[in-house]
Amino acid sequence: MLARTVSRRLSQIRGLNQVGLFLTTASPSVLDGVGTGKMTMAPAHKTVRTFTSQCETVSGEPEIPIDKMVSSIYTHVNSCQPASFTEEEKKSKPLEPRTIRHSYRKFVIPLSTDNEKKKEYLSAMGNVRIGKILEDLDHMAVHVAYIHNSENGSLDGPMTLPRTIVTASVKRIDFHNEDINSSRDVIIDGQVTYAGTSSMQISIRLFQNDESGNLIHLLKADFIMVSRDPLDSNKKIRVHGLVARTPDEAETINQTKEHFKNMSDLADRQTTNEELRLIDNMYSNLISRNKVNDIPVLTPKEMWMHKTSLSVTEICFPEYQNMYGKIFGGFLMRKALELAYTNAKLYCKGRVAIRSMDHIEFAKPVEIGHVLHLNSLVTYTHGKYLQMKVVASISDQNNLSELAKANLPTLGQEAQIRTNVFNFTMESVENPNTLTVVPKHYIHASTYLEGRRLLNNTLKRIVN
């Protein structure tokens, strides 16, 4: 019965234009591994395929607009009745493993036919605002995660267990093409590629037709979602497992599982001897330029890191809330990206392009009424590439004493709580020879090394 229901629901979702819904080992030009961060774009004259080989071609149905996807999440969450489940059910109710195909969904952002929607997405340059796309990616990740854990394979039905699904982190977003045309529809698809006890990885892609009608791959993202008890956010709620029905699906699941097991945190790992020597040589060189004393001296082609700071502060209004009454994670990503982009553009004195987002952390929720502080820095530079970091923190005028306890007591009314960290790799398009950023303080030396790891990792993965 469940299989028939899932099949019937999937038949309502149209495949990508001229897209075969399968992936075989004979077509490595499409995807080289979901969840691995290794991907190549299919040639424009070839069809683009979905993540798995399990889905058959689907056609004949109209595209489903993204607004319906968003509204379905709110309806699904509002229909949840957590009090109707016993504690025993939460702990022991059998949860049938699901396939990757079960959660696959595709939607369209109708920019070619909806003028109001087009205005929402229009940037100052006349193309699509990437910040708005980030909001859609976050919604898509939540939608797919709820589909994976729904009773009948759609959000029209109930949850198998009462759950609140939130974004824990964004492992990576790689941009293959950020120049998204504001007059053509954008296609977004996604599916679950890993499921643990209470966590999931959702892999999402974005496409758009070019002027010749060929489908172009724009980006790929990996979101880490967690399932929590609606009555107690500190309690985990189990999610459905993931099983493979084809060799391709098995490879996808195993690769992602291996990445979860062995994922090395590039941002927080211990400083190596090679990195220590790098900082020591850097300061020896800076000091050697001064023939009078031991004060480091910069050249006209260098800039102190603390001089690159750019900040913005605003109050969190109800219009930014998600279905749980917290500030929407996609909104926070959008604000961080737009600040980092602005800072990078000022630093480079020209247009920049976004290449990747890494290690995006959602440590604490942001509430309505909080004062949101976003601070950005250029943390590392290499030729025409820049690594940007944005740290988000909150303060609350009604709870200053509580916030102060979490910080040093001497901070008093300046006490803030860090909620998010965002890392962006950008490319200077108009001025390839950017200033070299240099750390002046110890904490900035640590930030410099963190940025160096992230930028080098991006260059190896999607540039070189």
Image: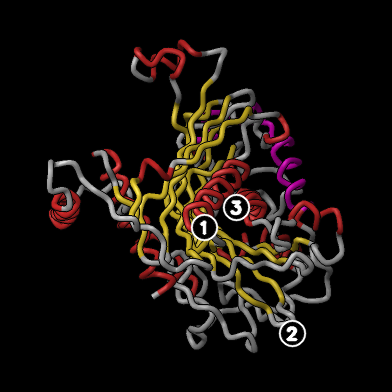
Report the disc number at residue 56: none
Name the residue at 64% across, 74% down.
55
Q: Is residue 198 above or below residue 190?
A: above
Nearest the viewer among 293 and 351 is 293
Badge 2, how many Cα within 10 Å: few under 14, some, many 20+? few
Look at the image and give the residue range highlighted in magenta: 67-91
The secondary structure type at the circle numbered 3 is helix
Q: Mark 1 sits on what residue?
A: 349
Nearest the viewer among 9 and 333 is 333
Report the disc number at residue 141: 3
Q: Mark 2 sits on what residue?
A: 212
Q: Position of residue 462 (x, y in %)?
A: 44, 71
Name the residue at 60% across, 73% down.
217
User: Is 117 positioned to the left or the right of 259 in the image?
Assistant: right
Name the residue at 56% across, 50% down.
342
Residue depth check, mark 2 versus mark 1: number of the one nearer the observer: 1
Name the residue at 60% across, 69% down.
218
**Of pointers 1 and 3, the one earlier in the residue sequence:** 3
Disc 2, disc 1: CB below 8 Å?
A: no
